[in-house]
Image: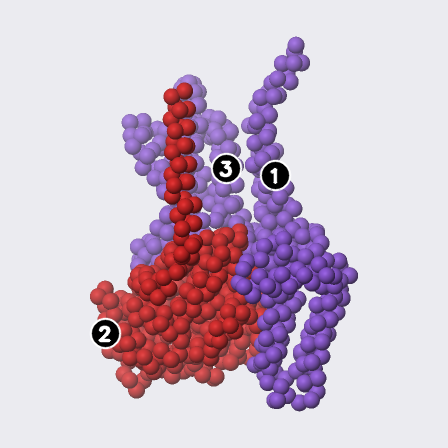
Chain colours: A purple, B red
Amino acid sequence: MDRKEKVFGYLFLLPAVLIFIFVAVIPLVQVFVFSLFDIQLNNPTKSEVSLSYKIDVENYANTLFTATSIIDSINMEALNDSQKKTISRIKHLLAMMEKSIFNTKTRIDRLNKVNELLNNFHPVDNKLKYLPVAAKEINQYNTYFKKIMDLTNSLPNTQEMNDLKQALLAFDQVIVKPNFVGLQNYSYYLKDSRLFSAVKNTLLFTVITVFFELVFGLMLAVVMHKVANLKNVFKSIVLLPWAIPTVISALMWKFMYDGQVGILAKFFADIGLIKSSADLLSSTTNAMIAAMTADIWKTTPYIAILLVAGLQTIPESLYEAAKVDGANAVYQFFRITLPMLKPTILVALLFRTLDAFRVFDLIYVLTGGGPANSTETVSIYTYKTLFNQLDFGRGSTLAVLIFIMVTIISFIYIKILGAEVFSHQKR
Amino acid sequence: MKRFIAVMVLIAFSVGLFLAFGPANSNAASKKQVTITYVRGKDETHATEKIIKEFMKKNPDIKVIYKENPSDTGQNHDQLVTVLSAGGSDIDVFDMDVIWPAEFAQAGYTLPLDRFIKRDKINLNDYIKGTIDAARFKGQMWAFPRFIDAGLLYYRKDIVPQNELPKTWDDLIKVAKKYKGKNGTKYGFLMQAKQYEGLVCDAIEYIASYGGKVVDESGNIVVNNQGTIDGLNMMRKVITSGIVPPNINTFTEVETHTAFINGLSVFARNWPYMWAMVNSPQSKVRGKVGILPLPKGSKGSAACLGGWMVGINKFSKNPEASWRLLKFLVQKEGQKLMAIYNGNVPVYKPLFNDKDVIKANPLIGDKKFIEAILAAVPRPVSPIYPKISDVMQIELSNIVNGKKDVKTAVADMDKKLKEVVKTSK
């Protein structure tokens, strides 16, 4: 009976486990698999995971069409005998190259069919488009391709010949090769100085902002806790920065920092904090400080609210007892408030650290990673790789690396700093 | 139970509606008329609607649905890529920024147009060569140019006398220094030097005016040459000469035109679009501004090529109708309508002498303007342009901010670009 109940109990957990697998484990595994391949979405020969050789028949037909029409339009009169010979040799080799792949009747039929579709301006579907071929055939194809390119390079450097060369080069782009690269993407990033400076920027940003947010947040929380009658109004006002979407607050700060019209820039310059109002976003150190300031302004209220909740759980009787024993306010703060608040502080710190580590929108709007890449964080680097350059292999690698770093941070917090907080059930 | 019945009724009703209007409509349409969809970035002038109306009048068998994407180039790019990379056929004809064709071609998003061009015997020599080069990749044409943009030098006519107009970059520094502060100006010269795409455009102008190159005809990286170093040294010189605002490294086009139309600067480098802003009622310098080709380096003057192209989705269900729309847009008629209603500079050369076009847009009649436009140099034509641009932005920003000297930055750029090209092959 007891056993049955236990199994039944676990059954209740099943939906949670399934959800966890679907939303966390599967995508993670997928990203990891992608990171082992060289995937580039804007390259047809590398746009998906591929483990075998294929040939893109449509692309081949189009390339052949362009190359032959350029060859046909070449003014043969202007060429000398050896050049004429080269051209006819190229023609011959092109035919040989075609035969190395289109060597059976079905394959030739397929090429003709694709050509017919293209000539009538009909789309070619993927079943016709990709033709699986053997590695041996590809090798043969490539030998002919190399010979053709060598011949073309010996031709004179005129506009016509350059066009021909360009068109012929495209024959290299019709083969879909296996794109498994193993851990190469990882070894690339181990040597990538840009990633190191991005990690450095991110860590600097995280440590400094979280430190100040905690200090200011604690101060705010104590004030909010003490001022009883104004509490709700005050709380709403304090929470405002947190309520504004980051993209909007980032834009707001951008305007305030602006060297020509920015109000903060002028104020700082007037009180002598910076040399001129133009300095704020334009030097590498200042840009970082500016980003940090905006982040501290935005998230201090969040920490404050979390800490107020923690403060409210401290029993008033402790303070009364301390008062009776003659402890002053400072002593009370360090001996009662801080120790009792420790669990809340640790949770707040964990949230904020992970958040700050993944900072993206604020910096993206404020500086775009500049000047001179001085404010590029790992998230911005990942965004640029994934979405701007559509390099999915490398981008996934970066995503996995961020995941690892975030795991390490959580581990440190939970294991070392928060040991007692998270294991309180055992006590 | 009641609710269940209500839901069933609703479903039955919508199925009925669909049967009544959905397929029946499209069937009827496909018999007489084909429908194609044309997408471009937001058109504030509404000229596109007029042009499309004109096209439909001439081609009653084609119905064109016109849709607008965001005006921000980057967002427009991302929206198109989302639809196209999924092989969607919702879009038939679409406008492309001048830097996209190679990327889209390589990705297999656009239909190669060679077979059409050959069949309809279109003469590519009628078009400005730089724009045709930008539409061509691996020998094939993937798009057609529609209009052209190029960097220009704006100057204050009320401050700089005609005989002191700068011809070289050194002149510019000298003259800007001399007149900085006059008539309420604070700065001598404005440009775009934030770490973003615009910085690449500005840098290409310095590089090309000294004969430097980033990529050669075969797509090899050749950036590490004397021309590039001289050009970028000049850019650094302009930035450190005290004629630009101290926070020039936060300037994009927006900061440039805001400061310029508020009368803060003697000179400014910007695209032709600023001309309309300069002469708008909000402008404080209305009627006081002239334009010049950009200053010369040792190898003459060079402007960065901007502008838009039009191409056909490879997965379009109606390539023939799409081609007819595209042809209308880029040939004499469509180009003329665009130049008149939209104020853009056409790429179809015979139109430069057209009276109606010049009347509508006096800039096109301006010899200096045409000179500047014809000297336009394209940015590197490459399927991995976003990566190339990214590397260039970082190293150029290093130069702008004095973090590296020009020689080191160029050598680093060369090394990184070569690696980027190698790994994407």
Element assignment for label 1: helix
How packed mark 1 is, by other alpha carbons closer than 10 Å (few <14, some 14-19, many 20 or more), is: few
The answer to which of marks 1 and 3 sits earlier in the sequence is 1
| Amino acid type, residue under disc 2 in the picture | Gly
Report the Cα–Cα distance between label 1 and label 3: 24 Å
Report the Cα–Cα distance between label 2 and label 3: 57 Å
Tell me what residue is drawn at x 32 percent, y 29 percent. A231
The answer to whether any part of residue B403 appears in the image is no
Q: Relative to residue A302, is residue A59 depicted above or below?
A: below
Tell me what residue is drawn at x 43 percent, y 79 percent. B126
Q: Which of marks 1 and 3 is in front?
A: 1
How packed mark 2 is, by other alpha carbons closer than 10 Å (few <14, some 14-19, many 20 or more), is: few
Q: Nearer the viewer, residue B412 or A156?
A: A156
Q: Which of B324 and A424 is in front in this view?
A: B324
**Residue ID for mark 3:** A351
Dot 3: chain letter: A
Q: Relative to residue A397, is residue B318 depicted above or below?
A: below
Q: Looking at the figure, which quarter contains the N terminus of chain A?
A: top right
The answer to whether any part of residue B286 appears in the image is yes
**Residue ID for mark 2:** B287
Dot 1: chain letter: A
Dot 2: chain letter: B
Report the Cα–Cα distance between label 2 and label 1: 63 Å
**Residue ID for mark 1:** A26
Q: Looking at the figure, which quarter contains the C terminus of chain A?
A: top right
Tell me what residue is drawn at x 45 percent, y 62 percent. B322
How packed mark 3 is, by other alpha carbons closer than 10 Å (few <14, some 14-19, many 20 or more), is: some
Q: Are marks 2 and 3 in contact (CB under 8 Å)?
A: no
Q: Position of residue B388 (x, y in %)?
A: 54, 65
Q: Nearer the viewer, residue A149 or A205?
A: A149
Q: Where is residue B38 in the image (x, y as percent from the top left)?
A: 41, 59
Q: Do the residues labelled 2 and 1 touch (CB within 8 Å)?
A: no
